[in-house]
Amino acid sequence: MNNWKKWVLVSSCLPLALMMGACARQYTAGSMNYTAYRIRNTMPADNALQDMLLPYADSVNKSMNKVIAEVEVALDKKQPESKLGNVLADAMKQEGERLYGMAIDAAFVNYGGVRLTQLPAGPLTIGKVFEIMPFDNILVLQKLPASTVKELLDHIAARGGWPCSGVQFQIRDKKAESILIGGEPFDPNKEYVIANADFIANGGDDCWMMRKYPQINKGYLVRDAFIQYFSRLGQEGKKINAELENRIVNAQ
């Protein structure tokens, strides 16, 4: 038995052995040694390993291949605004309102977090949603003063535009201007409820202005919000589509 097979065998059996012994006594690892193996598709297949993993692969593939909705036309990811971005940001806002039971003024999806450049027309599977959002980011809400919202919008403007819902603005000299939130002019004295990924709320993608504000967090993944939103559209017999609405435009 080569080293790779030994490693797989130990990794598979150790948790089971610990679970079987858990009723009698508890064990704590005193030390751990491991070796990293790089797997390439040019390596010969290991039939024994494939047989061992097959039941798990079948289960995962069955879940990932489940069709939850239909995409009417191909949706692209672009800046400053895109149809794919609008769909995802709307999903974030609507699922956030449903989950947290409160109105959300605006929702954002960081542009770099959307990992597909296009959602093709046709059946939408759960696996495809995982391709769009492979990260386990949590959907969180924050109540932000208008000054911080303006900082966030300026940051998004400087990055060329992110998917957003509930907000419109123009980009001029890498700043946000002519801002509307909920169709109303931006109020510098107001507090706004914002939906975001915890990655951004914790300062990710240089959004340091967000870190000092409390988060409303129910541990609900952004990806699950997308799956629920698309599933509901599918159950209602609606196809996934979107229009460009000038949510973010470059000033002339």
Image: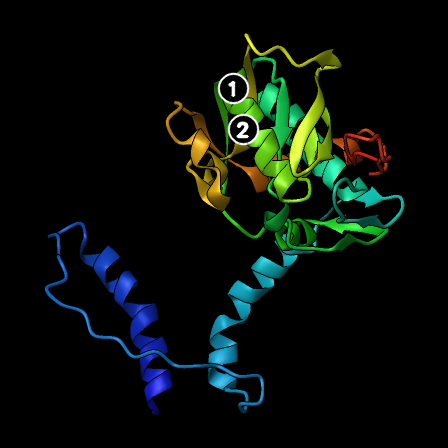
Circle 2 sits on which residue? 151
What amino acid does circle 1 point to?
Ser
Residue 111 position, x and y percent, is 64, 46
**For the view shown, which residue lies furthest in the front direction?**
173
What amino acid does circle 2 point to?
Glu
Of the 4 image quadrants, the one containing the C terminus is top right
**For the view shown, which residue lies furthest in the top direction?**
189
Which residue is depicted at the point 82% across and 54% down?
Answer: 120
What is the crowding at mark 2: few (fewer than 14 residues within 10 Å), some, or many (at least 20)? some
Circle 1 sits on which residue? 147
Which residue is depicted at the point 69% across and 53% down?
Answer: 128
What label does residue 63 carry, if any? none
Residue 168 position, x and y percent, is 73, 25
Q: Is residue 37 left or right of residue 109?
A: left
Which of 66 and 191 lies nearest the eye of the viewer? 191
Looking at the rendered structure, the secondary structure element under dot 1 is helix
Q: Is residue 25 shown above or below 50? A: above
Q: Is residue 37 shown above or below 69? A: below
Quadrant hosting residue 233: top right
Q: Is residue 109 left or right of residue 178?
A: left
Q: Are discs 1 and 2 less than 8 Å apart at CB?
A: yes
Residue 245 position, x and y percent, is 84, 30
Residue 241 position, x and y percent, is 85, 38
Cα distance between the residues tagged 1 and 2: 6 Å
